Amino acid sequence: MNGYGGHILRVNLSNGTITKEPTPAEVVRGYLGGRGLGAYLLWTEVPQGADPLGPDNKLFISTGPLSGTLFPGAGKMDFATKSPLTGGYAGASMGGMLTAEIKYAGYDSIILEGISPKPVYLYIDDDTVELRHAEAYWGMGSFALEKKLKDELGEEFQIATIGPAGENLIKYACINHDFGRQAGRGGVGTVMGAKKLKAIAVRGSGGIPIANVAEFTRVAKEAYRACKEAEGFEAWTRYGTMIITSWCDENGALPTRNFQSGSFEQGPNIYAPVFRDKIVVTDKGCFGCPTPCGKYSYSKKHDIYVEGPEYETNGMLGSDLGIGDIEDIARANQLCDELGLDTISTGGAIAWAMECYEKGILDREQTGGLDLRFGNAEAVFPLIERIARRKGWLGNLLAEGVKRAAAEVGQGSEKWAVHVKGMEQSAYDTHDATSMLLAYMTTDVGAHHNRAWAITYDIAVGRDKVTPEKAAKVIELQHIRPLMDCLGCCRLQWVELGLSLDYYAPAMTALTGVEYSWDDLLHISERVWNLTRMIWVREVEGFGREWDAPPPRFVEEPAVGGVTDGKFTPPEAAQQMLDFYYQQRGWRKNGIPTRETLGRLGLAELVGA
Amino acid sequence: MGVTLIPVGFLKEYTAGQDRLELAAGLTVAEMLEMVGIPPALVAVVMRDGELVSKDYQPQEGQTIKVIAIMGGG
């Protein structure tokens, strides 16, 4: 099948059986691959009500049709599962080199099911697929294990691992790869840990069948050239995502002290030029990337190497914790990576605890002796370790995420537990940005930015405006950006370099031999969006509008300081935005897709509407 | 010889599609943006010869300044 590996690899960890199945052509025609394929498999294979950490839940590791090809940014893959953090859909994308090896080995998806009786790792060398003992690796950090497996198996193997956080079932454990790339959000690493799967090592030597090699090569090379010649190329390559830190700070979007403010008085100490000059060693890119946004860094202060921090980590382990030293942020970043924790959720959980501490709700006995004031990096480092190991009362509490932690502690702390659907919000303050707030409220994994990011749009059209056009913009972005995750390529070439969207459909047509228009691709992306919505409807009892509620922090409390000082989004404005959104999506007032909408998208039969 | 201002991406919508503007030296970048009608808050990145500078920077004669908006976040 042109454009695809051609097979799905099924690995049952309970009984050790491994089977190869042909990739169904009609499924990839309807869902493309990557995120779309993962969502389809999650819907069809995981029984309703499955315990996210039990044997019935599955982890789907899916490449996209563009993954591993010449198309720029073709280094992306998707991890889908039922989230142990939120109880709903989890889909996390990851860059690096792994997706190409999986594709070259001939697989469009790896289905991990059951639970192994003992720790194992999955070895894939084309058709040779084995579960190998990993008792000796249990407890190892991510970087250490990746290095060890590369030493043992060979540098050409690409490795994904979990750290101790995944083993200890921290609800937001991540999957690590390529010494600094993560599938970060929603607890995909937690599910891997529950399955006692410590690592995946893959080498592939096959190719990707292409329907029209000459045309695909022409489109891919043209797109590549357009990226290299883009006016923003130099800036993005030099600074990566860190380049936006100063702008976020200026515009009240940089999360500060648990999102109490969007501006950080120590901000200039963590801006991109300081980062580049002080700690960056070299640039680091994913497979097929013309714009290496990854920055490999060395902190002399802590004597550690780390890929990063990138912007989200800078915000969530930096300003949101009141930390204004780029080397301290790099250290916290490195700890999270080695231990296998999502930096965004870790930052959100610690920021919530710091606010509790400063408000007298947590005392020093409860923090295990840590002086948990905002800005105290020396308390953050051991707390990260305690979370990853569920050590002490506070470490164990924060390991569950802010929603559960606040429910246990109470005393009003739910008001500053900054999450949507149980997922900690990523690094954009939304006191005064109604499109971005709506994006967070409706994103299909929880409060994450990668499905839609609209702060520049908010500023351009009026930050506090409440209009149908704003809801339409969020929906438009929620179709385009996740489409990239279905295709298996990075969105940054489009969103930041301005790569024309006109390249994608011709590339897919030449690659697969199936005639795709841009509208066809968007229609599929909308189908996937509604399917992930239906996963929530199926898995969460009573799911509805209240699950799209904004964090109280942004609709009940004004921001403090900076350009958004005193600003917040009135609750009725947030609800009005939600009304616009549901109406345009073809969802009922309770946030559930109508039968007509599901029918229009070809989902009615699948979901039994 | 003045200063060349290059708006990138959708910022050109504010300059009637012009992708290079020749301006007199003596203004800060922020003042130049105001003058040509680009809202300074939309500009996230100001580059001078490959280096980041702030919007308070005052370009010298003959320099080229590129201004970029952020459309995608981190």
Image (tube, rainbow, N blue to C red):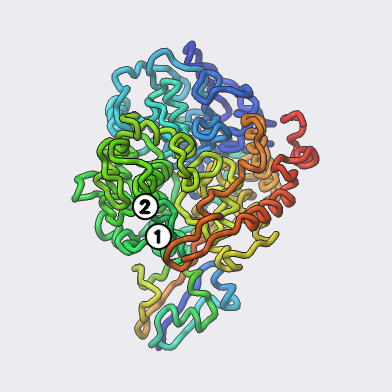
| Residue A183: x %, y % from top left | 45, 38
Quarter placement of the C terminus of chain A? top right
Which sits in the foreground, A563 or A201? A563
Task: Look at the numbered disc 1 and give the secondary structure of its residue.
Answer: helix
Q: Which mark is residue A314?
A: 2
> Within 10 angstroms of label 1, few (less than 14), some, or many (20 or more) residues?
many
Is B36 drawn above or below residue A441 in the view shown? below
Task: Look at the numbered disc 2 and give the secondary structure of its residue.
Answer: helix
Q: Are marks 1 and 2 in contact (CB under 8 Å)?
A: yes
Q: Which residue is tagged 1?
A: A245
Residue A494 can be seen, yes or no: no
| Residue A234: x %, y % from top left | 40, 63
Q: Residue at horizontal 34%, vertical 63%?
A: A265
| Residue A1: x %, y % from top left | 62, 32
- Mark 1 falls within which chain? A
Is A85 drawn above or below residue A579 in the view shown? above
- Residue type at tag 1: Thr
- In the picture, residue A29 is in which quadrant? top right
